[in-house]
Amino acid sequence: MNIVLNWSDWLALFGHFLTLSLLAVGGGFSVVPGMHRFLVTEHGWLSDPQFASSIALAQMAPGPNVLFVALLGWHVGINSGGVLWALLGATLCLVGIVLPSSVLTLFATRWARRNRQRPAVRAFSLGLTPLVVALLASTAWLLLEPNIGADASWRYWLAGVVAVLVVWKTRMHLLWLLLAGAVAGALGWI
């Protein structure tokens, strides 16, 4: 894919990730649909396979969960002309998604700790739960969308329902579910 980005496009990329950072109350994955809409649907800077493979590759790598954001920026840069642009894209996206939320979290948690007994602080904390659940559900839908339709395998749905039930009803570590999914995929079950 070859794209041409000017400085206003790079600034728009950075600005978009800055704003997504303030919405990412459930972590970077909660705003994946917003990233997809901006990078793939609106601007066409990434293809669907590039977007999905960036997330998959970053999740397989050790390190923080948010690394997929840098990989998205890297691919935008590669598509626009090479390694130096890729470094710029990775830096803009990663700094954009990390900086505002980190600064806000630092100040907000200090304030909330001092005022944790106030009813408004407790209500705000409780009110965030449905927002985080909805944002994560929209991410799950976006990642499952290629497997939804007439040719979708019932095994995908069964694996998803089983994973949700196991997470909900047990204290099993998520890495065991990831391992089980990898084994099922390697054996051709899903």
Image (tube, rainbow, N blue to C red):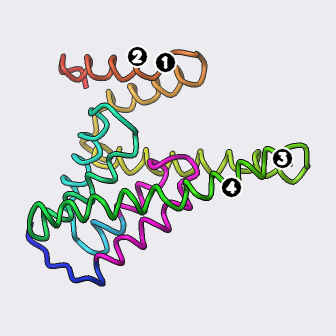
Determine which residue is flagged by label 4: 107
Q: Classify mark 1: residues with Cα within 10 Å, few (<14), some (14-19) or many (20+).
A: few
Determine which residue is flagged by label 1: 173
Quadrant that contains the N terminus: bottom left
Do the CB atoms of the residues marked 4 and 2 lie less than 8 Å apart? no
Nearest-to-viewer mark from 4 and 2: 4
Between 53 and 107, which is closer to the camera in this rendering? 107
Determine which residue is flagged by label 3: 114
N-term mark: 2 or 3: 3
State the CA–CA distance, disc 1 to disc 4: 31 Å
* Amino acid at the residue labelled 1: His
Nearest-to-viewer mark from 1 and 4: 4
Is residue 61 shown above or below 101?
A: above
Region of the chain picked out in magenta, as a range: 10-36
Label 4 sits on a secondary structure element that is helix
Do the CB atoms of the residues marked 2 and 3 lie less than 8 Å apart? no
Percent x, y of residue 27? 51, 47
Determine which residue is flagged by label 2: 176
Percent x, y of residue 65? 40, 40
Residue 165 within the magenta-colored segment of the rendering: no
Label 2 sits on a secondary structure element that is helix
State the CA–CA distance, disc 4 to disc 3: 11 Å
Do the CB atoms of the residues marked 2 and 1 lie less than 8 Å apart? yes
* Amino acid at the residue labelled 3: Arg
